[in-house]
Image (cartoon, coloured by chain):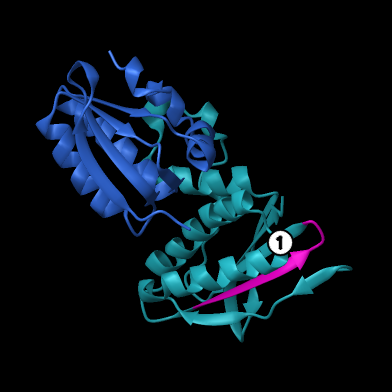
Amino acid sequence: MAGAKSGSWQRYDADMKWYEHIREDVLAAAEVAGVSPRQQLRLELGFEEILVNIISYAYDYRGFVWVKTAEEGDCFRIEFADHGKPFDPLVKDHRPLEEIPLEEREPGGYGIFLVKKNFKLAEYKYEEMFGQMANHLSLLLDKK
Amino acid sequence: MAKEFLQKESSGPNDWTVWSVSGRIDMVTADSAYATGEDIVLRNVKTVLDMTDMEYLSSAGLRVLLRLNKLAKKNGKTFTLARPSGIVKSVLEDSGMDALFTIYTSLEELD
């Protein structure tokens, strides 16, 4: 894409002990890309939700999570990949949250809703990456 | 500079107990926040979470609020929120939590 400054995929152990390290890497990349402080908090909302899901549920064994960030014009893209069980987090509940009665809302349903609400685009694919089939999630955020 | 995760309990107007949380309620701090909130809600009749110095609230934080709301109702207590701003206010509004709680803009409004 014209005007895109793409980083490379970074591989980490899918382990909570790496969470803060990965967070620092992503926020440093966002800072360099010129993502505003307010949008960095929105980035964190998506980042936390997706990364914690992968670390907590993707694998029944020790696995990896790959993360890539890229600047795309006025936007910032963050991508996640893992070789865990096939899982599309974006189809958890198709209804907008405001259409779900309060008493029907499950505590676990808020995270993906916030991802959809705060990012310009959220895409999921199950495709071959790094030599195996992988969950591949891509999120696009306005920088300002 | 990011604010440190700190929690404080104090007395408010009209017999309210004020639970102040500064910094972030995220996946790292959610368990600690819930444990403190559970203790305060169960010991007091009316608890308000003062969000003045809260900088970030993720879905893990929303789950804490939802659980404390259910706990309070189950035990005949009152639990509500006050003075959210910035991304914290946005997250409450986006998630529809603002319909679940009476959200006070100042502690003087507590009745």
- x and y, in percent, of residue A21 in the image: 46, 75
Q: In this view of the protein, can residue B107 be seen by the observer?
A: yes
Q: Quadrant of the C terminus of chain B?
A: top left
Q: Residue furthest left?
A: B43
What is the chain letter for disc 1? A
> Circle 1 is placed at which residue position?
A34
Most foreground residue, A93 or B90: B90
Q: In this view of the protein, can residue A89 be seen by the observer?
A: no
Question: Would residue A36 be counted in the magenta stretch?
Answer: no
Q: Tally the numbered discs.
A: 1
Give the residue displayed 57% in from the left and 34% down from the top. A96
On the image, which quarter does residue A67 sit in? bottom right
What span is colored magenta in the figure?
A65-74
Q: Residue furthest front?
A: B1
Give the residue displayed 75% in from the left and 74% down from the top. A6
The colour one sees for chain A in the rendered image is cyan
Question: Would residue A68 be counted in the magenta stretch?
Answer: yes
Tell me the chief SS of the magenta region. strand
Amino acid type of disc 1? Gly
Give the residue displayed 16% in from the left and 37% down from the top. B40
The colour one sees for chain B in the rendered image is blue
Which SS class for mark 1?
Answer: loop
Mark 1 surroundings within 10 Å by alpha-carbon count, few (fewer than 14), some (14 through 19), many (20 or more): some
Q: Is residue B35 left or right of residue B28?
A: left
A29 versus A119 height, above or below? below
